Amino acid sequence: MVQVVSLSILGSIFHAMKEDIEKNQVGPCGIVCISCPLGSGTVAKTAGQTRGFIEGYKISEWAPYVSMDGERIDWDQVVRGMEWMMKYAVCAGCESGGGPPDCTIRICAKENGVELCSSCDELSSCDKFDWLGEHGEQLRETLKNCRGASKEEYIKSLEGSMPWEE
């Protein structure tokens, strides 16, 4: 007997599996993917919704009547920007090949066999976080405070927030 499974059911199963993977994924830098607006898909989804509002409510047509600035906006360019964000403002997470390909943190962690930088003896003096500016320093501090925690414990400790929001 052959069972036929609808594409929507397969899509739901895939989506649930993807969410489970994202929930348990953290970059060596300490960013928990599901809490990240790029890793969770929030930015791409919001861009899609915004594009839908711009086109659906014909904002480009009535914007000039609301304000003179509305006439000066290139609405086609705004929509192209939203389309770009829908396509590229997403991240699969470092464990799944996402993130910046030249990320110094991920490269170093991989070279040194480190899953989470909190287990690295050189974290306190590490300059690999510098390219992230203020967030880099906050990430490093969060990781220092979580030394000895497993990946799962680390993820749970940050549940729903970015490491710099503590």
Image (cartoon, rainbow, N blue to C red):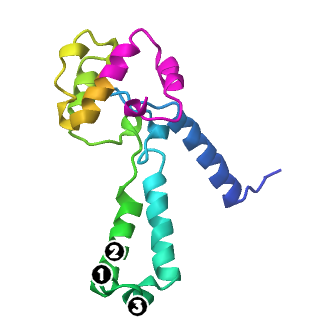
Q: CA distance from mark 1 to mark 2?
A: 8 Å
Frontmost residue, 124 versus 150: 124
Q: Is residue 150 magenta?
A: yes
Give the mark, 1 or 2, whose residue is nearer the N terminus.
Answer: 1
* 130 with respect to 151 (left or right): left
Q: Of helix, strand and loop, which one carries label 3?
A: helix
Say which of marks 3 and 1 sits in front.
3
Give the mark, 3 or 1, whose residue is nearer the N terminus.
Answer: 3
* 58 with respect to 29 (left or right): right
Query: Residue 65 bears which disc, if any?
Result: 3
Mark 1 sits on what residue?
Answer: 73
Q: Residue at x 37, y 55 (%)?
A: 89
Question: Disc 3 residue type?
Answer: Tyr
Q: Residue at x 66, y 51 (%)?
A: 12
Question: Disc 1 residue type?
Answer: Ile
Q: Is residue 106 above or below residue 141?
A: below
| Residue 162: percent from left, percent from top | 42, 35
**Residue 4, picture quadrant:** bottom right
Q: Quadrant of the C terminus?
A: top left
| Residue 48: percent from left, percent from top | 47, 66
Q: Residue at x 41, y 38 (%)?
A: 96
Q: Residues within 10 Å of mark 3 (few under 14, many from 20)?
A: few
Q: CA distance from mark 3 to mark 2?
A: 18 Å
In this picture, which residue range is highlighted in magenta? 141-166
Question: Disc 2 residue type?
Answer: Val
Q: Are marks 3 and 1 in contact (CB under 8 Å)?
A: no
Q: Of helix, strand and loop, which one carries label 2?
A: helix
Q: Are marks 3 and 2 in contact (CB under 8 Å)?
A: no
Query: Residue 117 bears which disc, if any?
Result: none
